[in-house]
Image (tube, rainbow, N blue to C red):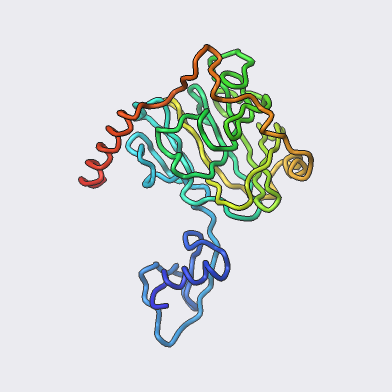
């Protein structure tokens, strides 16, 4: 290869480590090589460090609704929110292994979904929480005392189903834990260290961590502690009986009648596409 970027591509094929997670340091140097750096024809030695920071960093640049978001690493706020919601995904997905994430819910204005999605096209403002192809901790409605796990009560929401009730987080300060094990094909959710439940996830596709900001006061911080910091009950849940998500209640049902949830019309989507194109042509 002629450049560091090309070398990373080769290493990705051999080691199954995505280029975005690779940090290459030349022998005798403390500086991380840039992708455009040229490699010497005589060759050289490099040390590769796996940096998982992109797996817990929100993707601002790739989100079509980015003008409404303020992102700083794993922290997202939305003071400019002018639509009903925005789905926010990480820059890099989980592809293999076991990983523990924490969603620090500094403020929940109304509803929240935190979890995993397999389709990154769900980022932005077009796919409402109940239409997500996802495996999520639904936080419920902060201003509701309803026990309806479709709309109101916190619950496991997975693949279009409201499955089982979870404990409702507080409006401020709760921590939703998420232990993901791609090899075992399972994810376990906890609230403030207390296990809520575990269900199956795919083992054959990348999975992006996601959150769903719903009001202009929402404030979510994503962290990725060491695996040893995961609650022991979460680790045990991955090897036990998993919740069967197909037996849940359809999220297409609206508890107040009809089948309409918070979503945008096709005309709105076309308008945003035009707006984004104009925005991009002017630069950020």
Residue name at image x 21 percent, y 46 percent? 281
Location of residue 139 in the rendering, given as x and y in whole percent from the top left corner: 58, 26
Give the quadrant of the C terminus: top left
Location of residue 116 in the rendering, given as x and y in whole percent from the top left corner: 56, 41
Residue 223 sits above or below residue 169 on the image: below
- Visible in this render: residue 175? no
Q: Report the side of 190 relative to 17 (left or right).
A: right
Location of residue 185 in the rendering, given as x and y in whole percent from the top left corner: 68, 48
Residue name at image x 61 percent, y 29 percent? 161
Q: Report the side of 98 relative to 283 (left or right).
A: right
* Depth order, front residue of 243/103: 243
Give the quadrant of the N terminus: bottom left
Location of residue 149 in the rendering, given as x and y in whole percent from the top left corner: 62, 21
- The mark total stands at 0
- Visible in this render: residue 18? yes
Location of residue 223 by image quarter:
top right
Residue name at image x 46 percent, y 73 percent? 7
Residue name at image x 70 percent, y 31 percent? 196
Q: Report the side of 53 relative to 85 (left or right).
A: right
The furthest residue to the bottom: 42
* Depth order, front residue of 160/90: 160
The furthest residue to the left: 282
């Amino acid at each position: 290869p002629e450049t560091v970027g090309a070398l990373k591509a080769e290493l990705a094929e051999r080691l199954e480590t995505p280029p975005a997670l690779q940090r290459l340091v030349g022998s005798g140097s403390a500086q991380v090589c840039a992708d455009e750096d040229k490699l010497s024809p005589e060759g050289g030695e490099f040390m590769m460090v796996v940096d998982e920071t992109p797996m817990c960093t929100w993707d601002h640049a790739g989100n079509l609704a980015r003008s409404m978001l303020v992102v700083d690493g794993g922290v997202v706020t939305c003071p400019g929110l002018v639509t009903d919601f925005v789905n926010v995904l990480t820059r890099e997905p989980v592809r293999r292994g076991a990983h523990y994430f924490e969603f620090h819910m500094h403020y929940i204005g109304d509803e929240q979904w935190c979890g995993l999605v397999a389709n990154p096209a769900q980022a932005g403002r077009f796919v409402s929480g109940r239409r997500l192809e996802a495996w999520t901790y639904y936080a419920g409605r902060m201003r509701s005392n309803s026990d309806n796990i479709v709309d109101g009560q916190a619950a496991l929401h997975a693949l279009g189903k409201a499955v089982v009730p979870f404990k409702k987080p507080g409006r401020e300060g709760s921590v939703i834990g998420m232990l993901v094990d791609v090899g075992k094909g399972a994810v376990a959710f906890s609230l403030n260290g207390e296990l809520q439940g575990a269900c199956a996830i795919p083992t054959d596709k990348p999975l992006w961590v996601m959150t769903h900001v719903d009001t202009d006061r929402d404030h979510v911080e994503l962290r990725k502690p060491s695996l040893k910091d995961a609650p022991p009950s979460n680790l045990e849940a991955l090897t036990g009986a998993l919740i069967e998500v197909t037996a849940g209640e359809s999220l297409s049902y609206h508890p107040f009648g009809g089948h309409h949830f918070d979503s945008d019309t096709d005309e709105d989507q076309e308008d945003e596409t035009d707006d984004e194109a104009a925005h991009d042509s002017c630069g950020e």
